[in-house]
């Protein structure tokens, strides 16, 4: 009951950010499962091209996440970074319908990730500043739940439109509608007041001003991310195993549905039992999922429980990982802290996606999935035994 009362007492910024993410992800996740199909069937590109596209797009966006996070701290403002980022994404997605080659898809995905880069760190800082520390896990969990609700709507809509034989190009054009609504809602957000600082925090590539435990956390996150390539490879794996084209978006919708249902309760659990315990459990689930998916031959029915299992990983980790950042970083450097977090998680996607695509195409899918599983297990052990002993006891252990 206390959690329900807390939900009703959340400031409007939390709910508006949730609605913005719901609409944005409805459009983004409608495109996401279609892109590997679009690349393979329309533009005739394979796993290597997919790895290059996703790696470059995500890595570049991650550099901007650091840039936007640092500037939001210096300027003491987050809202208009959020508005600008969502606006760019709203314009970029429909233009994918005009692409005639995979380099053009790369350019437009690049623009979409630039938008994400501009908004992500300021949005996370805005959300963390809107609630008290004891409610961070729940707040991030609610946000992730609404984000994942959009990720359910998008693939379901994609599957329905494909079953109605609507061309992929036409589907991409319709993403303009939720994009416009997203920008309107983002403009309505009121950001919380920040304490006025006489001396603005200075940026340091050496992470001066951050405690050592935060730096350890980033290193472990980098190791995990090296094995966490683009989720599009999961959909490509399902398609190559023989899943019908129209069912591919349904698999991704299942992942998002499970994540939506469990994000808030599992993230709230991190407020009571500790962030690290939940993240370690989630990373272990990830490793097992990749191992089983890589070893699975052509047992198609097993894909459905496996992808649901993957949704549990997302639910357990997405909110808790971000709440842990706020637990470990100084309050006056919160935007910068999320910039470093997002940079680390995104920049490694370039080598991760390139390496995964290379291992898959030149060696075997089993090798690629086994490598990712190994990175996850090792990262979980380091987080538990190297990071956690030096972390503050409250909400972290």
Image: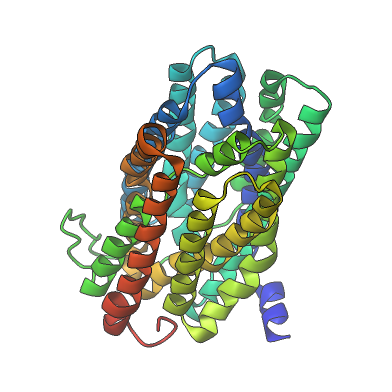
Q: Position of residue 45 (x, y in %)?
A: 49, 21
Q: Is residue 55 above or below residue 331?
A: above
Quadrant of res 353: top left
Quarter the N terminus occupies: bottom right
- The quadrant of the picture occupied by the C terminus is bottom left
Asked if 380 appears above or below 87 in the picture, the reply is below
| Residue 182 visible in the shown view | yes
Residue 15 in percent (x, y) is at 66, 60
Residue at position x 26%, y 82% from top?
A: 390
Name the side, left or right, on which 80 lies relative to 154. Answer: left
Q: Quick one: which residue is furthest to the top in this view? A: 100
How many numbered discs? 0
Q: What's the residue at 60%, 46% (across, down)?
A: 186
Task: Answer yes or no: is residue 192 visible.
Answer: no
Farthest residue toward the right?
164
> Which of 40/83 is in front?
40
Q: Is residue 130 left or right of residue 107?
A: right
Horizontal arrangement in the rendering, residue 81 relative to residue 7 (left or right): left
Q: Nearer the viewer, residue 300 or 59?
A: 300
Q: Position of residue 147 (x, y in %)?
A: 63, 53
Q: Quadrant of residue 144?
A: bottom right
């Amino acid at each position: 009951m206390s959690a329900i009362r807390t939900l009703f007492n959340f400031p409007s910024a939390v709910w508006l950010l949730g609605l913005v993410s719901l609409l944005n992800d409805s459009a983004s996740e409608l495109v996401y499962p279609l892109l590997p199909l679009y690349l393979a069937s329309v533009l005739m590109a394979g796993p290597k091209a997919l790895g290059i596209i996703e790696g470059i797009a995500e890595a570049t966006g991650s550099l901007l996440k650091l840039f936007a996070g640092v500037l939001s701290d210096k300027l003491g403002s987050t809202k208009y970074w959020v508005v600008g980022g969502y606006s760019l994404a709203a314009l970029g997605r429909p233009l994918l319908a005009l692409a005639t080659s995979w380099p053009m898809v790369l350019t437009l995905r690049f623009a979409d990730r630039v938008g994400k880069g501009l908004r992500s760190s300021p949005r996370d800082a805005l959300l963390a500043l809107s609630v008290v520390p004891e409610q961070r896990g729940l707040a991030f969990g609610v946000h992730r739940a609404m984000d994942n609700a959009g990720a359910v709507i998008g693939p379901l809509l994609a599957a329905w439109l494909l079953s109605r034989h609507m061309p992929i190009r036409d589907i991409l054009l319709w993403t303009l509608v939720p994009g416009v609504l997203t920008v309107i809602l983002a403009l309505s957000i009121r950001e919380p007041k920040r304490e006025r600082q006489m001396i603005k925090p200075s940026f340091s590539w050496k992470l001066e001003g951050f405690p050592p435990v935060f730096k350890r956390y980033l290193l472990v996150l980098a190791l995990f991310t090296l094995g966490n390539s683009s989720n599009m490879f999961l959909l490509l794996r399902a398609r190559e195993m023989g899943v019908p084209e129209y069912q591919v978006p349904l698999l991704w919708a299942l992942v998002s549905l499970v994540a939506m249902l469990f994000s808030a309760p599992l993230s709230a659990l991190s407020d009571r039992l500790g962030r690290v315990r939940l993240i370690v459990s989630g990373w272990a689930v990830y490793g097992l999922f990749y191992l089983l998916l890589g070893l699975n031959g052509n047992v198609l029915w097993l894909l459905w429980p496996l992808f649901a299992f993957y949704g549990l990983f997302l639910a357990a980790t997405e909110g808790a990982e971000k709440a842990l950042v706020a637990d470990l970083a100084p309050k006056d450097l919160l935007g910068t802290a999320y910039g470093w977090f997002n940079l680390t998680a995104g920049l490694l996607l370039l080598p991760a996606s390139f390496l995964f695509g290379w291992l898959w195409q030149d060696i075997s899918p089993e090798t690629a999935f086994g490598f990712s599983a190994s990175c996850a297990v090792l990262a979980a052990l380091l987080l538990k035994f190297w990071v956690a002993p030096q972390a503050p006891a409250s909400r972290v252990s």
